[in-house]
Amino acid sequence: MTTLPQLSDEAAADWLERHRSGVAPEEALAFFDGLPPVPAADMLGRWRGSGLPTGSRLDGLLEAYGWYGKEVLGAEAVHPLLLRGPGGRPRAVDPVWIPLPLLRDHAGLARSWPVRTAFGRIRPLLHTHRHRARLRTIEHRGVSTAAMVYDALPIIDVFRRVGPDVVIGAMDMRGLPEPFFFLLERDTAADV
């Protein structure tokens, strides 16, 4: 893979502003490839998440289940999935209980009211204080950058820098043909 010139923070923020409501997957991947890597230390803290719609079958699914974001306390201490709890406060959920084949292969069913309602009823049982991922620097698409490696799931979230407090993530999940793109914005109000 050839190295492309990296976008400046201003150019990346401008691109993102123009494409937050949706973009073709090829264009999202080209944007991702044009961004600088993220040093693992820059990922420390709590992050608010949102999807970057690309036509992926996972678009909007995390938000439908109350996704808040992610939290990185250290290289061995990562909460890869925070959902909104009572009062909207973020609570760590053990992602091992999330039915990945259902989400990946039947996202329409996962969006249905009965499934979301059932999940809402059992969600309090899924909360955890244990860390369920690790932060590593990996080589992805020819660039060494920060990545979140899930402990018990075939998922790696790879990050690139959009700005000092914004990163784009590409979820690499076994069985998903294209990456699922999402944004993380540093939660400056978090007491981390």
Image: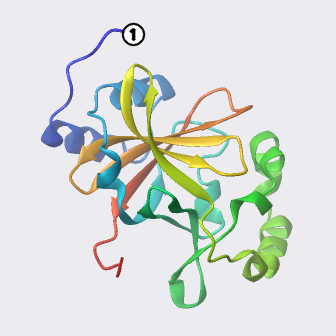
Where's residue 56, x and y in %?
61, 37
Where's residue 72, x and y in %?
44, 62
101 relative to 6, above or below? below
Quadrant of the frame with the N terminus: top left
Residue under label 1: 1
Q: Residues within 10 Å of mark 1 (few under 14, many from 20)?
A: few
Q: Nearer the viewer, residue 67 or 20?
A: 67
- For the point 36% across and 76% down, the residue is 192
Q: Nearer the viewer, residue 4 or 13?
A: 4
138 relative to 103, above or below? above
Where's residue 143, x and y in %?
36, 25
Q: Nearer the viewer, residue 169 or 57?
A: 169
Numbered circles on residues, count: 1
Q: Nearer the viewer, residue 72 or 65?
A: 72
Furthest-front residue in this view:
76
Give the colouring mode of the picture.
Answer: rainbow
- For the point 81% across and 81% down, the residue is 121
Give residue 94's quadrant in the image: bottom right
In the rendered structure, the answer to whether residue 105 lies left or right of residue 37 reads: right
- For the point 62% across and 77% down, the residue is 129
Q: Under tag 1, what secondary structure?
A: loop
Callout 1 amino acid: Met
Where's residue 22, x and y in %?
45, 41
134 relative to 88, above or below? above
Furthest-top residue in this view:
2
